[in-house]
Image (spheres, rainbow, N blue to C red):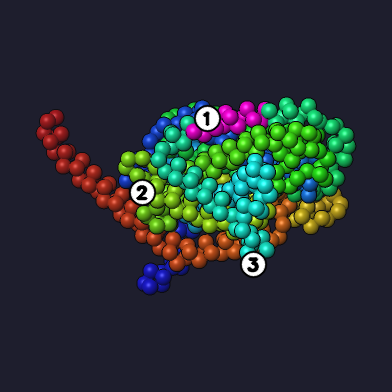
Amino acid sequence: MRALGKTPSRLKDRLLARSLDATEITEVRAQSQNDMKKSLNWWDLIWFGLGAVIGAGIFVLTGLEARQDAGPAVVISYVVSGLSALLSVFCYTEFAVEIPVAGGSFAYLRVELGDFVAFITAGNILFEYIVSNAAVARAWTSYLASLCNRSPDSFRITTSLAPDYNVLDPIAVAVILAVSLAALFSTKHSSRFNYIASIVHVIIILFVIIAGLIHAHPENLSEFAPYGARGIFKASAVLYFAYVGFDALATMAEETKNPARDIPIGLVGSMVTTTAIYCVLALTLCLMQPYNKIDPDAPFSIAFQAVGMGWAKYIVAFGALKGMTTVLLVAAVGQARYLTHIARTHMAPAWLALVHPKYRTPVNSTVVMGITSSVIALFTDLSVLANLLSLSTLFIFLMVALALLVRRYYVSGATTNSDRWKLIGFLIVILGSSVALSIVWSTGTNGWVGYTVAATSWLLGTLGLWVWVPMARKPQFWGTPLVPWLPSASIAINIFLLGSLDGASFVRFMIWTGCLLLYYVFFGLHASYDTAKAAEKNFVSQNLAEGDRVAAQIPSVVIES
């Protein structure tokens, strides 16, 4: 109770407190008692990237969005969301190379934007993973049903609960728990399984593309964008779901042998490859069937059945199951490492930070995240999960891009007050103009005035940052190109896509964020405050002891001389 009475002063302290690169790499990591094993190289990361991303998004949501929102222009939707994801990848890569720890974006935000912002974002990161796993697992059931010539609902249990939460999926629960169990034992073994499974997956994707294009009907593209530009961008926002997973690679930096070389190749290489595969697969699907006849549950399987290749649907269904299994595996690895690093700071219970002495994996975090994801997967419909997931993901990528600008242009003790205020001002202009552009778009306002004012303001804000604020820090090993333009563009695109999502997703997002605030104020704030102050006291004690040791040696040095 006494701690609760100190909440205002402690909150003020944590709002302004920023961690250090060295603190995250050494002191915070030491909370796990055992180090994770460095066993991954760039080749492992590329295949982890492909395994993490190519799954339910392309095999399920492509059909749903082509039919409901974009038509054949779903290909353009993938290009837009892929471009946004690629910009975010560049931002992530610089952080992952400079701060190679399991915390991923939580650690990056803690260093640049402080504990409070990092925790709120971290809560949404964990939420992203939980929702992602649940969505992929429910899609796994749909493709299993296709493989067995059954309806997906024949594997589910209908109840009298509220709509969107009334169809229970026990198979999704079983799949998540099985994959979580596999992730417990070895990251390198998980990598090998993912590598083999992803090779099989790529072979099946090549079959889908070649066999599908043989049965292509160009006339299916005649009505290319039936829902207009608004439908294309709405689909882009939802299809961001298809790119969720690459941020898990950043959490593997702590287990990478040479982060400065392996992470840029692994992250950027896997994202470019993935975007190309998505666009070709989406185009193939739309060439095989008219957009209004595409099946929303198992689009590729039903498309092959419609062109007289009924046997091919089994290959497609098997490939989809294979892909979604690797997505779940990589997510199980990544989400546990996020939670582990959060627990290292005591913002979550400290026992979640423990690394198993034999397997060198975060066992407790893996189990907790697996159970939580399975509970959500049991109840929640895929359409609800997809929109909510895209919102959380866009918010996280937006915050990482903002943190990168702060990292490059502000260093405590080196940046002058004048430059700091200029930085804050230009960041407000960039954020405000991006929000204005998103609002103009989402409200359906006609005319060019709103778009022109918002776009010009963004341009001037970014230009002002580039010209009038000196860069305070340069990366030591690998840097994001075209700073501040690239991260500023990432901020604008992510906010713009947020404006294309439905209002119900924002309500759910705000409810979750409100729950995070309550947890932080009553529990996380006080635990992390006590831990931080204990670390500071320990640091001072060590420095004093070192000073006493040096002072004790001075007389002997003088006598010897």
Please name which of the two marks, 1 or 2, marks the residue nearer to the observer.
Answer: 1
Which residue extends farthest left? 559
Name which residue type carries label 2: Leu
Q: Are marks 3 and 2 in contact (CB under 8 Å)?
A: no
User: CA–CA distance between discs 3 and 1?
Assistant: 42 Å
* Residue at 64 percent of width and 61 percent of height: 158
Tell me if 118 is positioned left or right of 320 in this view: left
Label 2: few (<14), some (14–19) or many (≥20) C-alpha neighbours in 10 Å: many
Tell me if 72 is positioned left or right of 167 in this view: right
Which portion, as a residue range, is magenta?
193-206
Q: Work out which quarter of the rendered image holds the C terminus and state it.
A: top left
Q: Is residue 170 visible?
A: yes
Badge 3 element: loop
Coordinates of residue 223 in the picture (x, y in percent):
87, 40
Q: Can residue 394 be seen in this view?
A: no
Q: Which mark is residue 196?
A: 1
* Residue at 43 percent of width and 64 percent of height: 523
* Residue at 70 percent of width and 33 percent of height: 312
Instruction: Confirm whether the magenta stretch covers residue 467.
Output: no
User: CA–CA distance between discs 3 and 2?
Assistant: 41 Å
Q: Earlier in the sequence, mark 1 or mark 2?
A: 1
Coordinates of residue 417 in the picture (x, y in percent):
53, 50
